[in-house]
Image (tube, coloured by chain):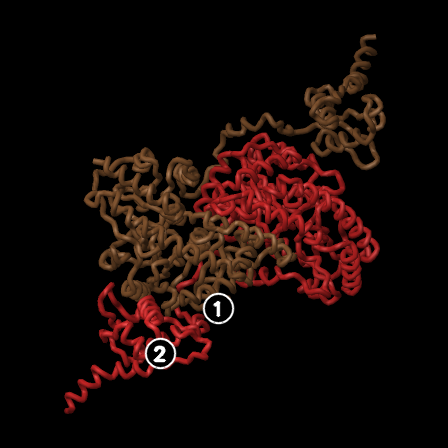
Chain colours: A red, B brown
Amino acid sequence: MIVNNQLFIIFSQPIFDLMLLSINKNSNETIVNQLLRQIEGLIDNGSLNPGYRMPSTRELAELVGVNRTTMIHVYDELWARGYVESTPGSYTYVRKRKTAVIPESHIENTDNLKTDLFHSNVDINLADIDKYIEGMNKTENEIIDMAHLVPDSRLLDKKMIGNCLRDIVSLADADLFDYAHPRGFAPLRLEILKHMKLHNIYADDNNIIITNGSQQSIQLIFQAFSKPGDKIVIEAPGYSMLFPLIKIFRLEVIEIPVTERGMDFKSLRKIAAKHEIRFIYTMPTYQNPSGISMPQAEREELLNYAESKNCIIIEDSIEEELKYFGKAHLPLRSMDISDRVIYLGTFSKVLAPGLRTGWIIANKECVRNLTAIKTVFEISSGSLNQFFLYRFLQSGLYELHLRKMMRAFRKRMNIAISSIRRHIPAERISWSAPSGGFLIWIKLLTKPIENIEDHFIKYGVNISAGRNYFSNQQSNNYIRISISNGNEKEIEEGIARIGQAIKNLN
Amino acid sequence: MIVNNQLFIIFSQPIFDLMLLSINKNSNETIVNQLLRQIEGLIDNGSLNPGYRMPSTRELAELVGVNRTTMIHVYDELWARGYVESTPGSYTYVRKRKTAVIPESHIENTDNLKTDLFHSNVDINLADIDKYIEGMNKTENEIIDMAHLVPDSRLLDKKMIGNCLRDIVSLADADLFDYAHPRGFAPLRLEILKHMKLHNIYADDNNIIITNGSQQSIQLIFQAFSKPGDKIVIEAPGYSMLFPLIKIFRLEVIEIPVTERGMDFKSLRKIAAKHEIRFIYTMPTYQNPSGISMPQAEREELLNYAESKNCIIIEDSIEEELKYFGKAHLPLRSMDISDRVIYLGTFSKVLAPGLRTGWIIANKECVRNLTAIKTVFEISSGSLNQFFLYRFLQSGLYELHLRKMMRAFRKRMNIAISSIRRHIPAERISWSAPSGGFLIWIKLLTKPIENIEDHFIKYGVNISAGRNYFSNQQSNNYIRISISNGNEKEIEEGIARIGQAIKNLN
């Protein structure tokens, strides 16, 4: 009897358990999920043992009082999750899962990984990047934002953009959804080449590759042409997001001061004399952050110097288009007879950084190498943004938008300049008025303070601290003002607040 | 007199030259450009010497017979190009350019760069990549394309997509044009996380980063977590575009044969026993190119094996969604209790590769490291495609599209399977019918031939050669058929042509 009894339990307890499966038709949980949860529970707690032959779907459906289709779903799902095994037309058996299905509640526990499995080999300061990402958030309403270098999106004609977007679907046909060419969508390449002629840059279709913005352009160049220990000449102050890239690629920095005439050649000659130089990185027009443009003589000197050193010039022309005061010299690439200038263009500063579209114009072999890396790294850039930009350029909307920007920023920069003269005590700052672009660089003649941004925030204005633009992050007595994001009223009020903040510095 | 005469020539010849500037009002060239061309010519050929004081714009305008505004434009442009120098309010002097302005005709000469300035340090075969890019072109009309793994864009509702695109401009407001978060547009992240629950993957917002497609996902993982010489286990046959990435990052490949049950564990245990493994890369569901899905027992075994080796699993789930025959096991990530699986998702195979949008779900620290690299490399992915996808998912259009794909490909795969049985002599091939996805992998029992694609092209069908899927490119007696791109008729006809081509092999 004991033997029988035990046998009875071994063979029949499971069927009782299955008979007790309950269904609540008023629950938010689907019937399939209710059944699944209960059956999985029976397997997990050992009530249904591995090897137990499950009733047929028909039998169990009758037992539980659901229709058979529901039960087939339940069995399929049990199979998908590895709780049962079966072959077509045969019985279904409970199987032993070697791993758990992770429940939703598990999420928070995933931080406790004990190993160093995800230790990164890349030389990157995670806390710095976290801070940078946090800083990307726009300033709150009551604070005037003069920190971000992002064009005022209020100048965009949203309706035209909406129509342009709708139109491309029918125009693009399948292309819009297929991979673009790794060098970029061909008609957009041609539009950009046409546009580059306005800057006296003549290039063939083999000389251009479209990228996800200038940051990717620089990255691809370093990927292709740098090796650890290579020397790169940069401007001080200079583009802040270049520093972590330089660090990742383990380049050695030669920082050259920027004067009123751009990169200081006397320093360059002296400091760089004994070095082999691989790259010179420069923004000759409306440099970020100084706003300074390099005069023609210095441009020519830089080209000759690069030739004597046989190095690559990376010409980052982020604000090239913003010649709203008329006068600006031509890009280095336009006089680059020895074909060593890699020109970086972008739509981020005049149109929209969110499009993440820039381009490179350079020597054909250079472009071929960059294209190969781009292909292996991500196949190609997105078609949607490229098709949109193609339409935007080709239909003339880009030219219209550019003219609107020119008119707006000619006024805005004039207001910024006169506001600085009016609102900031002249004896407390040293600066020079830019001849275009979005940026004004101001040296504070006051005592340096820590966390200078916080001081200005207290006065209701957000600026970018000068230390961000030096590789050693030392110089804290500079601020960068960006007028890209504000209208005339905001610019004047922002600068008035900056003046107030500076008056209250020691 | 001779002295006088000579003096006369020195001082006055330039003014005669300038008086001879001619204007053709019927020319296509603008008047400004006509004048520029001629004056630059005079400077370039030495008729106007450096230091020569140019007439005022008023004087020269009168001499030439144009209005003064035109001449101011000409002088400004001469200045921009470095042909003259002047300071505000002073005279204009011809200056000596040290470099030439490059004319349009120069373009073709730029190939003659003699130095190895653009020698790349990256281990990449340029010819292979050129060939790959060429191969991205769609097959011409009369050839049936069974080579490309790109979803049939005819299944997309273009009008709905057009409206969706137009709508996002007003919905998105400024966000659409601003930088997205480096981990991706926040509302899209949440939509994807919601969707992942359908695959039993529960993750927190800190566990996800949106990328430019799976290729970039893998690249970022290698950037962050690999160092040269690290060992990676891959499937053979396996994803072809993984090979150049592995080469660039100098990883050592351990290739494990794929059997009917996926990666062969007996081989893995034997081959990998003496190695430290850093990564296991696998496509457990509808593997590319074999079409095979790994059974539950093997999935569990793989997880346990990875734990014993303490390595990272990269789970590439490119066709995860395409479970149109109903049955498929859950992803590895859903049972990844030790948090070592990096799950790669993508919209490329069910929606549109041109959107270049994929995602990674993984351990929080892993995601933090990947995000840092993504930020430094390109700031963030584009906003436009992300906003579009957000709308597409959030409005339910994605679910609708997915169901449409399921219905279509359930039929199409059934037709493909029956066509193979009908049209290809069974004794000449070895294959197994997939349980989902787009791919069918066929072993030819005929004699191997070179350039196997060309043979099939002769019969009007484009297939992908098996050698592409082995790191040593040796095995040529396989072909991969993709049904992703064809409707029922095209699939049947394509396979009939494949049958014909195979009949005519030795």
Question: Which of the 4 image quadrants contains residue B410?
Answer: bottom left
B7 left or right, relative to B346: right
| SS for callout 1 | loop
Secondary element under disc 2, as helix, strand or loop, is helix
A398 shown above or below B315: above
Quickly name the residue at label 1. Answer: B204
**Residue sticking out furthest to the bottom:** A1
Q: Residue at x 29, y 72 (%)?
A: A57
Q: Position of residue A490 (x, y in %)?
A: 76, 58
The front one of B23 and A93 is A93
Q: Amino acid at mark 2?
A: Gln
Residue B123 in sight from this viewpoint: yes
Kindly identify the residue that appears in the image at 58 percent across and 60 percent down: A133
Quadrant of the image containing the N terminus of chain A: bottom left
| Residue pictured at 44% horizontal, 62% vertical | B361
Question: Which of the chains bears the disc numbered 2?
Answer: A
Q: In the displayed structure, would residue A97 be above or below residue B156? A: below
Q: On screen, A23 above or below B111?
A: below
Which residue in the protein does label 2 denote? A38
Position of residue B32 measured from the top left corner of the image (x, y, whole percent): 74, 28
Crowd around label 2: few <14 · some 14–19 · many ≥20 (10 Å): some
Q: Position of residue A218 (x, y in %)?
A: 54, 46
Quarter of the image where the C terminus of chain A is located: bottom right
Q: Nearer the viewer, residue A223 or B165?
A: B165
Q: Residues within 10 Å of mark 1 (few under 14, many from 20)?
A: some
Is residue A271 visible in the rendered structure shown here? no
